[in-house]
Amino acid sequence: MIDVQDLCFRYPGQEVDTIRGISFSIAAGEIFGFLGPSGSGKSTTQKLLIGLLKNYQGSLRIMDKDAHAWNHEIYKHIGVGFELPNHFSKLSGLENLELFASFYGTGSQQQRDPGDLLELVGLQDAANQRVGEYSKGMKMRLNFARALINDPLLLFLDEPTAGLDPVNGKIIKDIIRDQQQQGKTVFLTTHNMHDADELCDRVAFIVEGELNLIDVPAALKLRHGRKSIKVITRSGGASAPPDVHQFELDQLGGNPEFLDLLNSTSVESIHSQEATLEEVFIKTTGARLT
């Protein structure tokens, strides 16, 4: 679906490339997380992928076609949800979607019903309300619905759950998973490592315009974590502090101390000590999430 080889890009007037020879491929039906600190090149890469920036070096293919060969027809096949919603505030939510649907031509088979999309993201009761009166979370959900208006094969989503409460965040993530089940491909940029861990088949970390790491989240967490488990027991009453025990995973089944603990004490929980994706992010990029 996307193939990038030795991609470089420099903004006019700059002496240093913003994107420095990055390479990656994204398969059809994959949710691909593109992660990195602010200013690392995430937005520039996305602008190159969606055709907003052109003067690059290297190879860039979108849907098995060289990016230079695409004209405005590419926008019939992609949907973009920007991090900062930009709507017509004096129009209603429904009117906003109807306006953007009109860009694809009346009667287009690709066009999705604006009312159905508003219901999908839980905005059906605010369909006729001016968007200027929407909360930030409502604007984010409308922004997401707009990215789906042309039923795209390829979705570019930038912080799709930002500003959403857990309930609405789950609704958006469920829709993203449903898009994947329909065979759609998702390019996801986010600072929310929990979302990336939940949704992405693979993640890539970009730092100062260079790709440092690409892998499956589960493999990254195991690689950067400790090969040990933490066992929580409580020898006193309910008000007593818990007892914490650490055991190495190697030869765990033959560890007499571990086996004795299981047989002699009430165990409250056992946790493996793989790293979180946030810890991998900090270790890989040298930056903390903001």
Image (tube, rainbow, N blue to C red):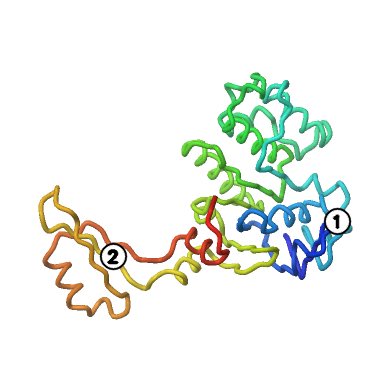
Give the SS element for disc 2: strand
The percent coordinates of residue 94 (x first, y second) are 69, 25
Residue sitting at x 73%, y 61%: 2
Q: Earlier in the sequence, mark 2 or mark 1?
A: 1
The percent coordinates of residue 130 (x first, y second) are 67, 20
Q: Is residue 207 above or below residue 192?
A: below
**Image quarter for residue 265?**
bottom left
Q: Nearer the viewer, residue 65 or 284?
A: 284
* Quadrant position of the N terminus in the picture: bottom right
Give the SS element for disc 1: loop
Q: Residues within 10 Å of mark 1 (few under 14, many from 20)?
A: few
Residue sitting at x 69%, y 43%: 82
Locate residue 262 relative to residue 79 in the image: left or right: left
> Badge 1 is on which residue?
54
Residue sitting at x 31%, y 68%: 229
Look at label 2 and name its amino acid.
Answer: Lys
Locate residue 242 relative to residue 1 in the image: left or right: left
Locate residue 224 relative to residue 154 in the image: left or right: left
Q: Is residue 14 above or below residue 246?
A: above
User: Residue 70: which disc?
Assistant: none
Q: CA distance from mark 2 to mark 1?
A: 51 Å
Q: Are marks 2 and 1 in contact (CB under 8 Å)?
A: no
Locate residue 225 relative to residue 261 in the image: left or right: right
Look at label 1 and name its amino acid.
Answer: Lys
> Badge 2 is on which residue?
230
The percent coordinates of residue 214 (x first, y second) are 60, 67
Residue sitting at x 54%, y 50%: 290
Q: Residues within 10 Å of mark 2 (few under 14, many from 20)?
A: some
Q: Is residue 273 above or below residue 234?
A: below
Say how many tags the image has: 2
**Image quarter for residue 286?**
bottom right
